[in-house]
Image (cartoon, grey):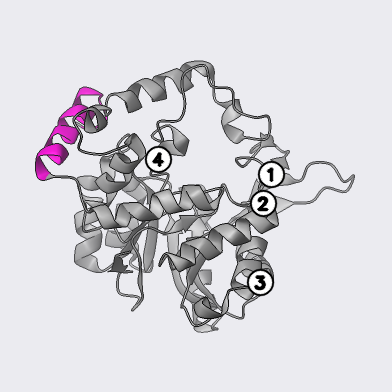
Amino acid sequence: MRYRPLGNTGHHVSEVGLGTYPLGGTLITSGSYWSGPATYGEVLLETAVETIHHGLSLGLNFIDTAPVYSEAEVYIAEALRRRPQHLQDMEVFVETKGGEHVRPVADGGPPVLARDFSREALRASVHRSKERLQTDLIEGVLLHSPVAEEMAEDPLGLLVELRAERHVGHIGVSASDTTEAIRLIEEDGRAEIIQIGFSLLEPEPTERLLPLAEERGIGIVIRSPLASGFLSGKFTADHEFGPDDHRSLIPRERLAERLREAESFMWLVEEGIAESLSEAALRYILSFSGVTSVIPGAMNPAELEQNVAISDLGPLPDAALARVVETQRELGLLA
C-alpha cells in the first residue's frame, strides 16, 4: 500500500481507502427528497467487521462514511473495537459527514431521508455520529454535498467551531460539483479536505481542481470512482438490480447509456494495459498527484482486497492517459 499526505492536515493516508456506502446494509427511506432503497442492499455486521479488518491488515488506514449509509458508522465502530491485537496500534483516519439525515417516523414506517444544514441540526448530527462511532473526536467531518441555498447558516463555520471544541479533528466539504470545489478553495479557504466525484466518466476535476488543490495543500478524496459500479465491468444492459439496491431506480435507458460510455474504455483491457476495467478506472484516478485517496466501496473482503491491490500497480502509462483524454472528448465528457 502506498500513502499520500492528506493536504496540510499532517496525516498520511492510504491512497486506496474504503467507502462504506455499500457496507452499511439495507436502508429503505421515504420522503420528498428520496423514497425507496437508499443503499446497495444487505450486509451483515460480521461481514462488515471482517471486511474492515481485512482492509486494515492490507495497510488501508482511511475510511469514509456518513450517517445516511445505514449502519456503516456502527459497523466501523464495532470493527475498530474488535481489532485483532496486531492491528490495535494502527492509526485509522475515519471521516464522516453531516447535513443529510435519516429521521424516524412516528408510525414506525420507512424513515425520512432529509437534508438540514442548520447549525442546530449539524451540531446534533456530529454528536450522534460520535456516539455511533464510539469516539470523543472524529478525525474528519465533511458537509454532505450542500448546494448554495443550504448554506444560509454557514454550516462550514459551525464545523470550525466544533474543531475548536475538539469534537472534530479536521473539516471539509463533500462538494456537489467541481465548480463548488474550486470556489471553496479560492474564495472560502476553510475546508481542509474536499471530496469530489471523479472517474473515467467524470473527468472534469483534472482540468483545474486537482492542480489547484495540490498547490494549496487541500486533501482531495475521490468518491464514485467506479461510477456506482458501471466501471466495474460486472453489468450488462439487461442486469436486474435487487429491490433493496438504489440502482434499481435508474431508468433503463440511462443504465444502457452509462454502460455504453463505460465500454468505450475497454481498450485499456483489450490492449493489456490493465487486467480489468475496474483496475484501469482506479489506476486512472491515482495517476494524478493532486488526489489524496480514492474510496471505492466494498461489500465483502474479496471486493476490498481487489481494490487495495491497485495501489501496488502504479499509474497508467502516459500514452494511455493521453488516449483516455481523447476518448473522453469523443464522448463529450471533456471540452
Looking at the rendering, the stretch of residues picked out in magenta corresponds to 318-334
* Residue at screen point 61% across, 51% down: 69
Q: Name the residue under label 4.
A: 226
Question: Which quarter of the rendered picture does the C terminus lie within?
Answer: top left
User: Circle 4 sits in a helix, a strand or a loop, which is it?
Assistant: loop
CA separation, marks 4 and 2? 21 Å
Residue assigned mark 2: 70
Q: Distance between the residues labelled 1 and 4?
A: 20 Å
Q: In the image, what residue type sits under mark 2?
A: Ser
Q: How crowded is mark 4: few (under 14 residues within 10 Å), some or many (20 or more)?
A: many
Residue annotated with mark 3: 127
Q: Which of marks 4 and 3 is in front?
A: 4
Given contact means CB atoms under 8 Å apart, are the residues at marks 1 and 2 in contact?
A: yes
111 relative position to 321: left or right: right
Q: Position of residue 142 (x, y in %)?
A: 48, 62
Q: Residues within 10 Å of mark 2 (few under 14, many from 20)?
A: many
Tag 3 or tag 1, which sits nearer the N-term? 1
- Point out the frontmost of discs 3 and 2: 2
Read off the residue under disc 1.
Answer: 26
Q: Residue at x 47, y 37 (%)?
A: 228
